[in-house]
Structure formats: C-alpha cells, structure tokens
Image (spheres, helix red, strand yellow):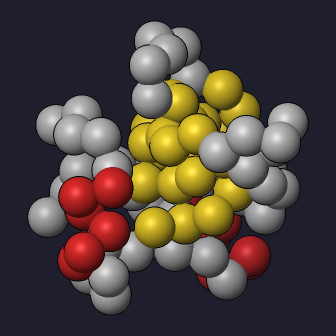
Amino acid sequence: MSMAWIRRQYGIPAKRGGRVIYTGQDVEQFGTIRSARGAYLSVVLDGERIARTFHPTWELRYIDLNQNPSARSAIPEMGLLSE
C-alpha cells in the first residue's frame, strides 16, 4: 500500500513531509509524516528522532498550509515542510 492508497482509502491529505498534530494522551504534539508502512503512517513527532506508526484516522489532525498560511507561524521549523 502507498501514500496515495491511504489518501484515497481514508479521504485524508496525507503526504510525505506533511505536518500533523497528534492529539492522543491529552496532549497535542506536532509531527511530520515520513512514509507509509502498509495502511499506516510513519510520523516523527517534533523533538523525537525515531518515527512512530499511526493509523491515518486515529488521533491525527492534518495541517494544510496551502489553505491556512497563517498556521505556518505556529509550526516549529524543521526544514521538512514541502512548499
């Protein structure tokens, strides 16, 4: 399965380098999508070095910088954002 399959299957804007907010465990953490593994996403949360595996619809919010450019200032720069 691929990132394109995940987008079609779940109707989400997931893409490599895309930004997400993990909302589990009563905290919000920003992260960057690194890859797809089967039907799951590999996400590196900000401040961590190792990717975690997440289901695309479980406690993730997707940030679309094209629709909300002002959100860029609220996202820590990691040099991984795709323009």
81 left or right, relative to 63: left
43 left or right, relative to 17: right
Q: How many marks?
A: 0
List x then y, in percent, for residue 39.
75, 52
List x then y, in percent, for residue 69.
23, 77
28 left or right, relative to 27: left
* Quadrant of the image containing the N terminus: bottom right
Q: Which residue appears at 58% of the width and 39% of the height?
A: 29
List x then y, in percent, for residue 10.
74, 76
Asked whether the viewer can see residue 18, the reply is yes
Please, is residue 37 above or below residue 4 in the view? above
Nearest to the observer: residue 83 or residue 38? 83
Image quadrant assignment for residue 8: bottom right
Asked whether the viewer can see residue 35, the reply is no
Q: Which residue appears at 65% of the width and 45% of the height?
A: 28
9 left or right, relative to 73: right
Q: Which residue appears at 69% of the width and 56% of the height?
A: 60
List x then y, in percent, for residue 80.
23, 41
Q: Residue pushed farthest top?
A: 49
Please, is residue 9 above or below residue 79 in the view? below
Nearest to the observer: residue 80 or residue 76? 76
* Quadrant of the image containing the C terminus: bottom left
Please, is residue 16 above or below residue 49 in the view? below
